[in-house]
Structures are given as structure tokens and as C-alpha cells.
Amino acid sequence: MIAVAGIAVIAAILAVMLKRYHQEYSIVVSICAGVLLLFAILENITPAIQQINTLLASAGLSAEYAAILFKSLGICFLAQFAADSCRDAGESALASKVELAGKIAIVVLSLPLFEKIAGTAVGLIGG
């Protein structure tokens, strides 16, 4: 966490200093720092992913549920990163569209899960 905070603070200082003279370089520094931070965070998330897989396997749940969970998390991270980058560039309307696209992608990805839940509910009510 110290490395992540350090990178973020240094990048923020550089971005603020560059914004006065070259705003386009400031945005590039922010995006590059964001990508670097994203990789640092994803590197540290591996133990959590292994633990979630272990929990799902011990509960007897399908690996499909884990795949839906991890894909949804990936979509969330990607959409948030893209939206924040758009906001940093002063494009808040574009950022809102990216967030909406991420939400819709998660709903579409989750449809098979909702279908199974609905089928189970109908089976319990009807049988």
C-alpha cells in the first residue's frame, strides 16, 4: 500500500506542476500513473482470487459463478479507470457514458446467473 500511495502522490504532484505549462502532458502523466497503479493493485489481488476460488469449490458451487464474479470485477475496474481518465481530461459527459456502458456490460454478463436463480425459484414454488 505504501508503494501505491507513493506513486499516486508523486504522480499527482507531477500532474499539478505540468498542468500549468503543458496540460496535455499532465493528462498523460495521470493516465500512466493510473495504469501503473492498476497493475500494482492487480498483482496484490492474486491471493484474494485464490481464496474466493477455494471458498466456491468448498461450497460446491460451479466455477461459472467465479468467472462471472471476476469478469464483473474486471469490468468495474476498467470502467472506473476509463471514466476517471475522462474526467481528468475534462470530459465528464464521456465519463458518464463509460460508466453506463460498464453497468450494462455487468447486467448482460450476469444474465445467465439471474436465469438460474429464477429457474430455481420457479422450481421451489412450483414443486
Image (cartoon, grey):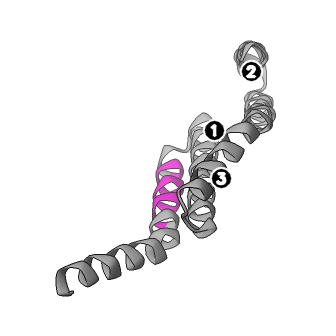
Query: Furthest-left residue in view?
Result: 125
The answer to whether the residue labelled 2 contacts the one labelled 3, judged by CB atoms less than 8 Å apart, is no
Q: Which residue is mark 1?
A: 89
Q: Amino acid at mark 2?
A: Val
Q: Which residue is mark 3?
A: 53
Q: How many marks?
A: 3
Quarter of image, res 20: top right
Q: Main secondary structure of the magenta part?
A: helix
User: Is disc 1 placed on a helix, strand or loop?
Assistant: loop
What residue sits 44% from the left and 67% below the top? 107
Q: Which residues are magenta?
A: 94-104
What residue sits 45% from the left and 72% below the top? 113
CA–CA distance in space, label 2 to label 1: 22 Å
Q: Which mark is residue 4?
A: 2
Q: Amino acid at mark 1?
A: Ala
Q: Position of residue 71 (x, y in %)?
A: 62, 60
Q: Amino acid at mark 3?
A: Asn
Q: Position of residue 62 (x, y in %)?
A: 58, 68
Q: Position of residue 87 (x, y in %)?
A: 56, 39
For the residues carrying marks 2 and 1, which lies nearer the camera in this image? 2
Towards the viewer: 15 or 120:
120
Q: Is residue 6 above or below residue 70?
A: above
Q: Position of residue 123 (x, y in %)?
A: 27, 84
Towards the viewer: 70 or 8:
70
Q: Is residue 103 above or below residue 2?
A: below
